[in-house]
Image (cartoon, rainbow, N blue to C red):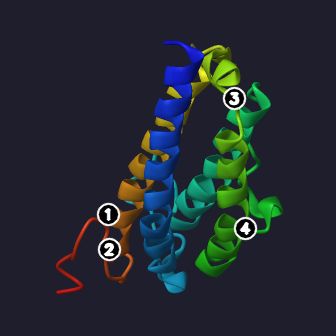
Amino acid sequence: MGPQEAKAVADFLIAEYENEIQATLRVIEAVPTSRLDYRPDAKAKTGLGLVRHITLEDEWILNCIANGVFTTPPDDSDACEIMSPADAVARYKQKVPAALNRVRALSGEQLVNVIDLMGMIQLPAVNLVSLAVKHSVHHRGQLSTYLRPMGGKVPGIYGPSADTQ
């Protein structure tokens, strides 16, 4: 793929990511604060852990793409200061659109540059934008399955849910 095509694909993916942001925020907002310790299995993240993961890693992945290099993933312990869904929503609204705008500003030449994702895979930046969308949607879907067992309601994501009808 050449730079011009990479820019067109990135523009499409960025628009898709922007469309997903509101659904992600609705799911995070729906997390009951009384059950943040809920986890469906011992190997699974807690509700709060998953809220932190989505919030911090969505920002991190986009900024790493914009920087052209992946750094150490963010610390999702209490030190991150996300202690509630409201904290996560405030940070997400501030940081993720800003990081997405940094990716939007990349040139076609930058988007075809291969970036090493911590030794796991090496892909052109434009392909990593696609991965960023998938990562966010995947973990949002995970979190949405936690909501009812936590005592919450599932918001509409791509239309109404059984809880919104």
The amino acid sitting under disc 1 is Thr
Do tag 3 and tag 4 residues touch (Cβ < 8 Å)? no
Labels 3, 1: front one = 3
Residue at the spot x=32%, y=82% of the render?
153
Residue 129 image point, x, y percent: 54, 35
Q: In the rendered image, is residue 7 in sight?
A: yes
Q: Using residue 91 as the reference point, say whether residue 155 is left or right of it.
A: left
Labels 2, 4: front one = 4
Q: Earlier in the sequence, mark 3 or mark 1?
A: 3
Labels 3, 2: front one = 3
Question: Disc 2 to disc 4, how far (Cα)?
Answer: 29 Å
Labels 3, 4: front one = 3
Q: Which residue is mark 1?
A: 145
Q: Which residue is mark 2?
A: 149
Labels 1, 2: front one = 1
Q: Which residue is mark 3?
A: 107
The amino acid sitting under disc 4 is Gln
The amino acid sitting under disc 3 is Ser
**Position of 107 relative to 100 (above/below):** above
Residue at the spot x=44%, y=60% of the render?
19
**Position of 124 relative to 93 (above/below):** above
Residue at the spot x=29%, y=75% of the render?
156
Q: What number is the disc on residue 63?
A: none
